[in-house]
Image (cartoon, rainbow, N blue to C red):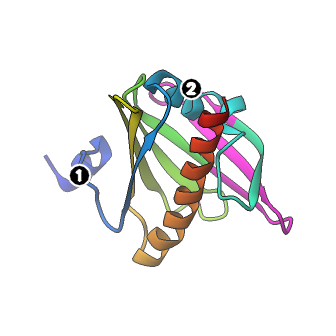
Amino acid sequence: MSAASSRTLGSDAPEGPSLTLDRTLRAPPARVWTAWTRPEVMATWFGPHHVRVERAEADVRVGGRFRVVMREDNGERHEVAGDYAVVEPERRLVFSWAWVSMPERVSRVTVTLRAVPEGTALTLVHDRFADPDTATRHTRGWTESLERLAAQLDAG
Protein backbone atom coordinates (compact mmCIF):
# COMPACT_ATOMS: atom_id res chain seq x y z
CA MET A 1 0.00 0.00 0.00
CA SER A 2 1.38 3.42 -0.84
CA ALA A 3 2.01 6.06 1.80
CA ALA A 4 -0.73 8.22 0.29
CA SER A 5 -3.39 5.53 0.48
CA SER A 6 -2.26 4.57 3.99
CA ARG A 7 -2.68 8.19 5.07
CA THR A 8 -6.11 8.38 3.46
CA LEU A 9 -7.34 5.25 5.20
CA GLY A 10 -5.79 6.42 8.43
CA SER A 11 -4.05 4.58 11.18
CA ASP A 12 -4.19 4.71 14.94
CA ALA A 13 -0.64 6.06 15.23
CA PRO A 14 -0.35 9.87 15.30
CA GLU A 15 1.18 11.35 12.16
CA GLY A 16 3.27 14.52 12.01
CA PRO A 17 3.17 17.14 14.76
CA SER A 18 0.47 16.12 17.24
CA LEU A 19 -1.00 16.49 20.69
CA THR A 20 -2.53 13.89 23.00
CA LEU A 21 -4.77 14.69 25.98
CA ASP A 22 -6.15 12.15 28.46
CA ARG A 23 -9.00 12.93 30.82
CA THR A 24 -11.29 10.98 33.12
CA LEU A 25 -14.81 12.37 32.99
CA ARG A 26 -17.44 11.69 35.66
CA ALA A 27 -20.11 10.55 33.22
CA PRO A 28 -20.80 7.32 31.36
CA PRO A 29 -19.59 6.96 27.75
CA ALA A 30 -23.14 7.46 26.43
CA ARG A 31 -23.31 11.00 27.91
CA VAL A 32 -19.81 11.86 26.72
CA TRP A 33 -20.68 10.59 23.22
CA THR A 34 -23.79 12.77 23.21
CA ALA A 35 -21.68 15.80 24.14
CA TRP A 36 -19.48 15.20 21.07
CA THR A 37 -22.27 14.37 18.62
CA ARG A 38 -25.32 16.53 19.39
CA PRO A 39 -24.89 20.12 18.18
CA GLU A 40 -27.00 21.63 20.96
CA VAL A 41 -24.75 19.97 23.55
CA MET A 42 -21.53 20.73 21.65
CA ALA A 43 -22.50 24.40 21.78
CA THR A 44 -22.35 24.34 25.60
CA TRP A 45 -18.67 23.37 25.89
CA PHE A 46 -16.82 23.43 22.57
CA GLY A 47 -13.91 25.89 22.39
CA PRO A 48 -11.59 27.65 24.83
CA HIS A 49 -12.88 29.63 27.81
CA HIS A 50 -12.84 32.97 25.97
CA VAL A 51 -15.18 31.88 23.16
CA ARG A 52 -18.82 31.02 22.78
CA VAL A 53 -20.33 28.85 20.10
CA GLU A 54 -22.67 30.74 17.80
CA ARG A 55 -23.57 27.72 15.69
CA ALA A 56 -22.81 24.01 15.77
CA GLU A 57 -23.78 21.43 13.16
CA ALA A 58 -23.03 17.71 13.14
CA ASP A 59 -24.09 15.00 10.69
CA VAL A 60 -22.48 12.16 12.65
CA ARG A 61 -21.99 9.37 10.14
CA VAL A 62 -19.04 8.27 8.07
CA GLY A 63 -18.77 10.92 5.35
CA GLY A 64 -20.95 13.35 7.30
CA ARG A 65 -19.72 16.82 8.20
CA PHE A 66 -19.47 18.99 11.27
CA ARG A 67 -19.15 22.76 11.51
CA VAL A 68 -18.66 25.01 14.53
CA VAL A 69 -18.72 28.80 14.46
CA MET A 70 -17.20 30.45 17.52
CA ARG A 71 -16.84 34.06 18.63
CA GLU A 72 -14.13 35.26 20.99
CA ASP A 73 -14.84 37.72 23.80
CA ASN A 74 -13.07 40.37 21.68
CA GLY A 75 -15.54 39.76 18.80
CA GLU A 76 -13.20 37.78 16.55
CA ARG A 77 -15.02 34.99 14.69
CA HIS A 78 -13.60 31.52 13.97
CA GLU A 79 -15.11 28.67 11.99
CA VAL A 80 -13.88 25.09 11.87
CA ALA A 81 -15.30 22.20 9.86
CA GLY A 82 -14.49 18.65 8.90
CA ASP A 83 -15.68 15.24 7.79
CA TYR A 84 -16.29 12.19 9.96
CA ALA A 85 -14.05 9.26 8.96
CA VAL A 86 -14.83 6.82 11.80
CA VAL A 87 -18.01 6.71 13.88
CA GLU A 88 -18.15 3.98 16.53
CA PRO A 89 -20.89 5.06 18.97
CA GLU A 90 -19.77 5.51 22.55
CA ARG A 91 -16.28 4.32 21.60
CA ARG A 92 -14.43 6.29 18.90
CA LEU A 93 -14.87 9.31 16.66
CA VAL A 94 -12.35 10.36 14.00
CA PHE A 95 -12.79 13.51 11.94
CA SER A 96 -10.83 15.93 9.81
CA TRP A 97 -10.26 19.44 11.14
CA ALA A 98 -9.80 22.57 9.01
CA TRP A 99 -10.24 26.21 9.89
CA VAL A 100 -12.29 27.93 7.20
CA SER A 101 -9.63 30.65 7.06
CA MET A 102 -6.96 28.02 6.18
CA PRO A 103 -8.76 25.18 4.35
CA GLU A 104 -5.50 23.83 2.94
CA ARG A 105 -4.32 22.92 6.46
CA VAL A 106 -6.31 19.78 7.22
CA SER A 107 -5.49 17.90 10.40
CA ARG A 108 -7.16 14.94 12.12
CA VAL A 109 -8.87 14.50 15.51
CA THR A 110 -9.40 11.11 17.14
CA VAL A 111 -11.55 10.89 20.27
CA THR A 112 -11.54 7.54 22.07
CA LEU A 113 -13.89 6.72 24.96
CA ARG A 114 -13.56 3.85 27.42
CA ALA A 115 -15.78 3.03 30.40
CA VAL A 116 -13.93 3.12 33.72
CA PRO A 117 -15.28 2.90 37.30
CA GLU A 118 -15.10 6.73 37.62
CA GLY A 119 -17.04 7.28 34.38
CA THR A 120 -15.24 7.62 31.03
CA ALA A 121 -11.58 7.70 30.09
CA LEU A 122 -11.27 10.05 27.12
CA THR A 123 -8.21 10.27 24.92
CA LEU A 124 -8.04 13.03 22.34
CA VAL A 125 -5.33 12.87 19.68
CA HIS A 126 -5.06 15.76 17.24
CA ASP A 127 -2.41 15.07 14.61
CA ARG A 128 -1.26 15.95 11.10
CA PHE A 129 -0.62 19.56 12.05
CA ALA A 130 1.30 21.69 9.56
CA ASP A 131 3.96 22.48 12.17
CA PRO A 132 4.75 22.11 15.88
CA ASP A 133 3.65 25.68 16.70
CA THR A 134 0.14 24.93 15.46
CA ALA A 135 0.03 21.82 17.65
CA THR A 136 1.08 23.92 20.65
CA ARG A 137 -1.66 26.50 20.03
CA HIS A 138 -4.28 23.77 19.70
CA THR A 139 -3.15 22.18 22.97
CA ARG A 140 -4.45 25.23 24.85
CA GLY A 141 -7.74 25.23 22.97
CA TRP A 142 -8.40 21.53 23.50
CA THR A 143 -7.30 21.68 27.16
CA GLU A 144 -9.80 24.45 27.86
CA SER A 145 -12.50 22.73 25.78
CA LEU A 146 -12.11 19.54 27.82
CA GLU A 147 -12.28 21.57 31.03
CA ARG A 148 -15.55 23.04 29.82
CA LEU A 149 -16.80 19.58 28.80
CA ALA A 150 -16.03 18.21 32.28
CA ALA A 151 -17.89 21.11 33.89
CA GLN A 152 -20.88 20.65 31.56
CA LEU A 153 -21.05 16.92 32.36
CA ASP A 154 -20.71 17.60 36.10
CA ALA A 155 -23.57 20.11 35.91
CA GLY A 156 -25.78 17.92 33.98
For the residue marked with disc 2, what is the amino acid?
Thr
Residue 73, position as x, y percentages in the image: 83, 64
Name the image quarter holding residue 59.
top right
Horizontal side of residue 54 vs 115, given as left or right? right
Question: Which residue is farthest bottom?
Answer: 133
Residue sitting at x 77%, y 51%: 52
Crowd class of label 1 (few under 14; some 14 to 19; many from 20; radius 10 Å):
few
Please, is residue 128 above or below residue 152 in the view? below
Secondary structure beneath dot 1 equals loop
| Left-right relation of 36 to 44 | left
Name which residue type carries label 1.
Ala
Which quarter of the picture shows residue 151? Answer: top right
Q: Which residue is mark 1?
A: 13
Q: Are marks 2 and 1 in contact (CB under 8 Å)?
A: no
The stretch in magenta equals: 57-80
Residue 132 is situated, as x and y percent measured from the top left of the image, at 40, 75
Mark 2: give few (<14), some (14-19) or many (20+) Cα within 10 Å. Answer: some
Counting residues from the start of the chain, the first of labels 2 and 1 encountered is: 1
Give the residue displayed 53% in from the left and 71% down from the top.
137
Q: CA distance from mark 2 to mark 1?
A: 25 Å
59 to 47, vertically: above or below: above
Query: Compared with residue 17, is residue 147 higher up or lower down, i.e. above or below?
Result: above
Most foreground residue, 122 or 137: 122
